[in-house]
Image (tube, helix red, strand yellow):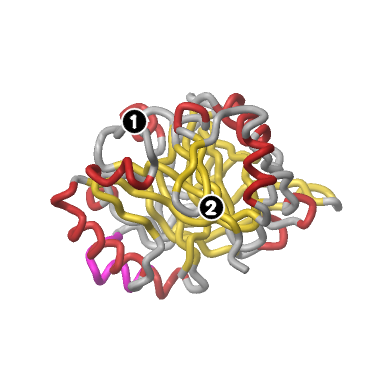
Amino acid sequence: MHIDHTVFLTRNYADTWRCYEQLGFTLSPPSRHFAAVSDRSEPVPSCTANRCAYFGGSFLELIGIVDEEAGDPWRVLPIVDARGDGLHGCSFGVDDSDAAETRLREAGLSTSGVLKLQRDVEVPEGTRTARFRSVHIRRDRTPEGILHTAEHLTPEYVHQPRYLGHPNGARSVAGIVLVVPDEEIAAYQQRYDVITGGRRLVGIVGVSDLDAVLPGETPRKLPYFAAHGVVVADLAKARRLVEEHVPATTRDRGFFVRAEDAGGAALYFEEEAR
């Protein structure tokens, strides 16, 4: 299991997409979602569309609420209504959704079954349908947002070579930061160990330590996803590009862009290990 992608939700999608392009990401064209409401139903139109920064094995998903009147099969609107634009989830890559569903159901963390998701994408030969399978973690166990698994059935339509080159040199998702009440750190870590099979994929930070991780950031309603990050080929080059548009703040192993300058969640950059 690995971080397949982070989940950013926004009503101000045009501004967010433009911001990430200015920060040096090559984004895929807008693509509407069709999602199943249960494991016994077929995908229906959703109120969302995404643009993504793809890296070949992981990506940042920037989801816009593009049609408020359309369906909301995966219940994203209540999250945006309650918390506003920002980073609201994470998806963990799996090779076998059925096995993941069994493990998570037996742990009492999922009742969704295996859900279908699809969206049309443009490839050089024309329009194709990218298809996925997913298992959702129970929302009553994850007040921080949306957690689910992702199994790619058509990865060739997603990680297309023409979208993998980024002016900022981004190569992969570096991680995601979850801020929780100090007294609940152990409980969250235990829950995420079960979700990820013991892999420490999510950086869980007590709110009193937020300033040490993201200096100067103001806490939001707990728990919440405060930041996601990328690994870049050349940290100095990436910082020069970013600072042409917004200020950057130094942090351990790199720098970050504050939530207020990145659409509602901090974005951090780390250098690729050599």
- Callout 2 crowding tier (Cα within 10 Å): few <14, some 14–19, many ≥20: many
Residue in front for this viewpoint, 221 or 40: 221
- Kind of residue indicated by mark 2: Leu
Vertical order, 43 against 63 (above or below): below
Q: Is residue 85 left or right of residue 145?
A: right
Q: Residue furthest left?
A: 183
Describe the element under mark 1 as helix, strand or loop.
Answer: helix
Q: Can you see residue 244?
A: yes
Query: How far across and down, in percent of the image, does residue 269 sit?
Result: 55, 48
Q: Please report the bounds of the magenta region as a residue range.
A: 101-110
- Kind of residue indicated by mark 1: Arg
The answer to whether residue 148 is magenta is: no
Residue in front for this viewpoint, 108 or 24: 24
The majority secondary structure of the magenta stretch comes to helix
Q: Which residue is mark 2?
A: 117
Distance, label 2 to label 1, CA atoms, is 24 Å
Residue at x 36% of width, y 56% of height: 203
Q: Is residue 151 left or right of residue 85?
A: right
Q: Can you see residue 30?
A: no
Residue in front for this viewpoint, 23 or 60: 23
| Mark 2 vs 1, N-terminal side | 1
Q: Quadrant of the C terminus?
A: bottom right
Describe the element under mark 2 as helix, strand or loop.
Answer: strand
Query: How far across and down, in percent of the image, does residue 1 sit?
Result: 46, 70
- Callout 1 crowding tier (Cα within 10 Å): few <14, some 14–19, many ≥20: some
Q: Which residue is mark 1?
A: 83
Residue at x 45% of width, y 61% of height: 92
Q: Is residue 197 left or right of residue 221?
A: right
Residue at x 67% of width, y 42% of height: 25
